[in-house]
């Protein structure tokens, strides 16, 4: 079997997400696996890999990051967004440097960290001043983009 191309992988996401929620549930994935003659343990295994932050849903972002669909230049930024979404559970757009560091110390965080250079966060922290504890995640993304272009 040849590796499915990116367009095909994206079509699969839309196919599995029949309700158009923007995320895949385990039930949805299991149904597609059954249709394609794969057993439930394959579905369990796939779900564990793709649900990076273990919240019971595979978002399009997780799907694209873990299946490597993003173009190289967008991948790190999207991975940082995933990190911030996981850390900033209330979705305030604000997070603390300590929270992000703690997230990387967890199992899930370590896995996600493979896609980004944690050193960027330390350099950003240095740039805003070591005494600053909270930051706006969009400010970090803006800084990050500029650094990448430089
Ligand atoms: Ca998830």
Image (cartoon, rainbow, N blue to C red):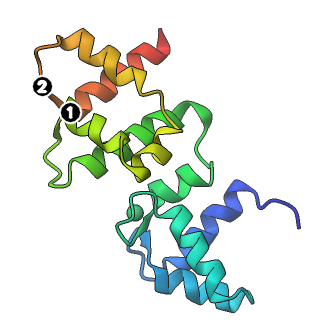
Read off the residue under disc 2. Answer: 133
Mark sitting on residue 12 = none
The correct choice, above or below, for 65 with respect to 11 in the image is above
Q: Nearer the viewer, residue 30 or 100?
A: 100
Q: Depth check: give the residue in front, 89 or 146.
A: 89
> Element at badge 1?
helix
Q: Quadrant of ligand 1?
A: bottom left
Relative to 143, does residue 60 appear above or below in the rendering? Answer: below
Where is residue 34? Give x, y as percent: 66, 91
| Residue 106 location (% of width, % of height) | 36, 48
Decide which of tag 1 and tag 2 comes sooner along the chain: 1
Which residue in the structure is indicated by mark 1?
A: 98
Left or right: where 83 falls relative to 30: left
Q: Does residue 142 lie above or below 123 as drawn? A: below
Which residue appears at 58% of the width and 89% of the height? Answer: 31
**Residue at 53% of width from left, 63% of height from top?**
50
State the image coordinates of residue 30 (x, y, percent, origin top left): 57, 86
């Amino acid at each position: 079997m040849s590796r499915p191309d990116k367009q095909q992988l994206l079509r699969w996401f839309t196919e599995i997400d029949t309700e158009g929620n923007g995320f895949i549930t385990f039930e949805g994935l299991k149904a597609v696996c059954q249709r394609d003659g794969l057993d439930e343990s394959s579905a369990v295994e796939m779900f564990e890999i793709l649900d990076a932050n273990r919240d019971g849903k595979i978002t399009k972002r997780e799907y694209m990051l873990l299946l490597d669909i993003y173009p190289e230049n967008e991948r790190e930024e999207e991975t940082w967004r995933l990190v911030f979404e996981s850390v900033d559970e209330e979705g305030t757009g604000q997070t603390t440097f300590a929270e992000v560091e703690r997230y990387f110390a967890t199992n899930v965080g370590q896995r996600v960290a493979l896609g980004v250079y944690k050193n960027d966060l330390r350099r950003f922290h240095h740039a805003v001043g070591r005494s600053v504890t909270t930051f706006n995640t969009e400010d970090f993304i803006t800084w990050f983009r500029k650094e990448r272009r430089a």
